[in-house]
Image (spheres, rainbow, N blue to C red):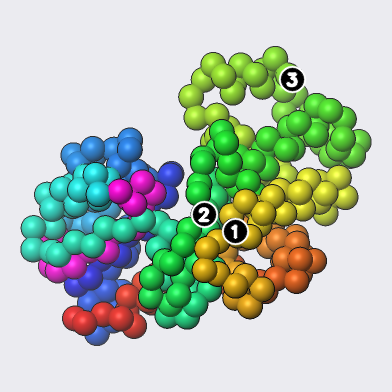
Amino acid sequence: MILVADSGSTKTDWIAFSTDNSIQLQGQSEGLNPYFANAEKVATEAANAIDKAYHDKIKEVHFYGSGCSADHGKRIIKEGLQMVFPSARFFVEHDLLASARALCGKEAGIACILGTGANACYYDGNTIMSEAVSFGYVMGDEGAGSHLGKLFLKDLLNHRLSNTVSQAFYERYPSFDLEYLLHRLYRTSDPNKYLSSFAPFISEHQKDESVKHLLKRAFNAFVDEFVVDLAKADIQSLPIHFQGSIAWHFKDILQEVLQDRQLMCGGILSYPINALLQYHRDNSRM
C-alpha cells in the first residue's frame, strides 16, 4: 500500500491506496510542521490517524508538508514516520510540491497556495523551477487569509466599508474595538489565525462593493508579490492554478483579477489531497 499525506498549518489529510488503485483508508490528524512538532509528535499523530492493522502493510509514504523544504524538517518527519511504518520507504517534500503535482500533474504551470498563508512556484511538469520568497504573515502572505483579515479590519476601523457591512460586523462581534484588536494581536498567541478567522465573514459579504474592492487589492498584491517575478516563467502563457480555502471561496473575484491582468486562470481546488492521490496513482510503480 502507498500512503499519501498532505499537511498544512492546522490539519493533515492521510489517504492510502493499494496495488489495484483502490482507496484502502483515509484519516485526518493535526497539522505537522517540523518547526513546531518533534518526531514523537509526528509518530503519535500518524498512529492515531491510521489504523494499527495497516501499519506493517504500508510500503511507501509520500508526505508533503509546511516546513519540509529544509533537510532538518524532512528528517524530523521521516524519523516520526519510521516509528509507525517500519516496512516503508519515505519521501518527504515541501507542501508547494504537493500543490504543483495536484494542480498541474505532468504539465507546466504556475501553482499557487492561498489559504491561511500564501506561496507560488513555477513547475515545469516535473520539477519546481523557481518559487516565490514567502515571508510569512508579518512581512507578506499577500492575498492569504491573514492578509484579508488585516485589510478588512483596517478598512472597518477607518470607516472605509459600507454601512451595511459595518453594521453586520458589529452585530456579529459586539465586543470588538481597537483596544481589543491590539490586545489580541500583540498580547496573545496565533495572531495570524485570529486575522484569518474573519475570512468567513468577509466571504459572506464579498459582493458588497467596499469588500470587493479590498479583495481585489489583496489578490492584485498576491500576483505582484508571488507571481510576476517568478524566474524562468512566462506568466502570460502559463495557466495559473490555485489551491486553498481562500482561493476556493473567493474564486470569482480571483478569476476577475487575473482576467483584468490578461493572465490565464487554471484550476482552483479547495484541498489538494484527492488530486494528489490521483497523481500518485498515475505515477505509481507498485
- Mark 1–mark 2 Cα distance, whole angstroms, equals 8 Å
Residue denoted by label 1: 229
* Residue nearest the observer in this picture, 201 or 217: 217
Which residue type does callout 2 highlight? Answer: Ala
Instruction: Considering the whole magenta stretch, tell me its main secondary structure.
Output: loop
- Number of marks in the rendered image: 3
Q: Nearer the viewer, mark 3 or mark 1?
A: 1
Which residue type does callout 1 highlight? Answer: Asp
Tell me the residue at 52%/63% (across/down): 231
Please check the rendered image and state whether residue 73 is part of the magenta-colored stretch, yes or no: no
Rate crowding at label 1 as few (under 14), some (14 to 19) or many (20 or more) other CA atoms within 10 Å: some
Circle number at residue 282: none
Q: Nearer the viewer, mark 2 or mark 3?
A: 2
| 123 on left or right of 115 | left
- Mark 3–mark 1 Cα distance, whole angstroms, equals 38 Å
Q: Earlier in the sequence, mark 3 or mark 1?
A: 3
Q: Secondary structure at mark 2?
A: loop
Instruction: Relative to 127, say whether 217 is above or below.
Output: above
* Residue nearest the observer in this picture, 48 or 234: 234
Point out residue 32 in the picture as x, y percentages from the top left corner: 33, 45
Residue denoted by label 3: 177
Instruction: Relative to 122, say whether 80 is above or below.
Output: above
Residue 187 location, quadrant: top right
Rate crowding at label 3 as few (under 14), some (14 to 19) or many (20 or more) other CA atoms within 10 Å: few
Q: Secondary structure at mark 1?
A: loop
Point out residue 285 in the picture as x, y percentages from the top left corner: 21, 82
Residue denoted by label 2: 132
Q: What range is drawn magenta here?
A: 55-70
Answer yes or no: is residue 172 visible: no
**1 and 2 marks in contact (CB < 8 Å):** yes
